Amino acid sequence: MKFGVVVFPGSNCDEDLVYSMSHIMGQEVVKLWHKDRDLQGCDFIFVPGGFSYGDYLRSGAIARFSPIMDEVVAHANRGGYVMGICNGFQILTEAKLLPGALLHNTSRKFICKNVHLKAASTSAVLTAGLDREKAFQIPIAHGEGNFFAPADVLKQIEDNDQVLFRYCSADGVVNEDFNPNGSLNNIAGICNAGKNVFGMMPHPERAADFELENTDGRDIFEALLERI
């Protein structure tokens, strides 16, 4: 399995992903520059967090038109795996690879802190192997992480088991008290209907190293690697 990490002007979590997947998970990883049109034979594409193009227009709106994204969309449409984290999630919604949109946090503030998540989908490869009872501690760092979708789209997402993670308490309670940004149904991540494109706002790559004294993100990557 070969992994690619897309790099846009303003990406700042690309190195975190490269380090986590290569040094910690022991996988082959290459960087994919936003102006390129070659996925270099990668099987799994990561779209990392950061502030692509400075988020000057709308988060992910400009990055969606980078040349590399034509190849990422084609890869996903062929059934290839794609995962967007934070700004990457925003880019994938702008590219219409994932439904819904990420709006401004209801607090109207940038939030950077640890939160807890519970795995939801039992059919998506990213979460199918995760402990359903565990509350994973994963950091967030975003100003536009408030997941929104029209009622009919949200129903389709829920009915089709496309919710990957929900925000919860440290002991696994899912309710509005532990929703950091106002996301509908406490949604922290979703996948597409085909279950090959994933998006999540929290950063598992920032919780994968033993030296950080938190490896809950590593659990997510390990579960993924076991299934693909």
Image (tube, rainbow, N blue to C red):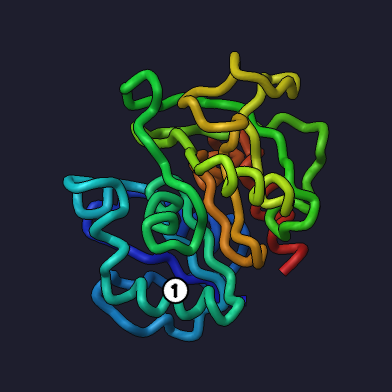
Is residue 226 visible in this depiction of the protein?
A: yes
Most distant residue in the front direction: 152
Determine whether 58 is above or below 123 in the image: above
Viewer-nearest residue: 83 or 184: 184
Q: Quadrant of residue 116?
A: top right
Give percent across and percent down for residue 198: 57, 57
Q: What residue is rendered at 59% in x and 55% in y?
A: 24
Q: Is residue 15 visible?
A: no
What residue appears at the point 56 percent right and 44 percent down from the top-left corner? 204
* Residue occupying the far top of the picture: 177
Name which residue type carries label 1. Val
Relative placement, left or right, of 56 versus 11 is left
Q: Residue at x 66, y 63 (%)?
A: 195
Q: Report the number of discs.
A: 1
Residue 215: x and y, percent?
Answer: 64, 39
Where does the C terminus fall, quadrant-wise?
bottom right
Q: Which class describes the residues within 10 Å of circle 1: few (<14), some (14-19), or many (20+)?
A: some
11 with respect to 136 (left or right): left
Say which of 113 and 62 sits in front: 62
Q: Which quarter of the figure has residue 95?
A: bottom left
Percent from the top left, x then y, of residue 209? 57, 43
Compared with 215, 225 (above or below) is: below
Tag 1 residue: 73
Q: On the picture, is 114 further left or further right than 185?
A: left
What is the x, y in percent for residue 7? 32, 63
Query: Is 172 above or below relative to 199?
Result: above
In the picture, the quarter occupied by the N terminus is bottom right
Secondary element at tag 1: helix
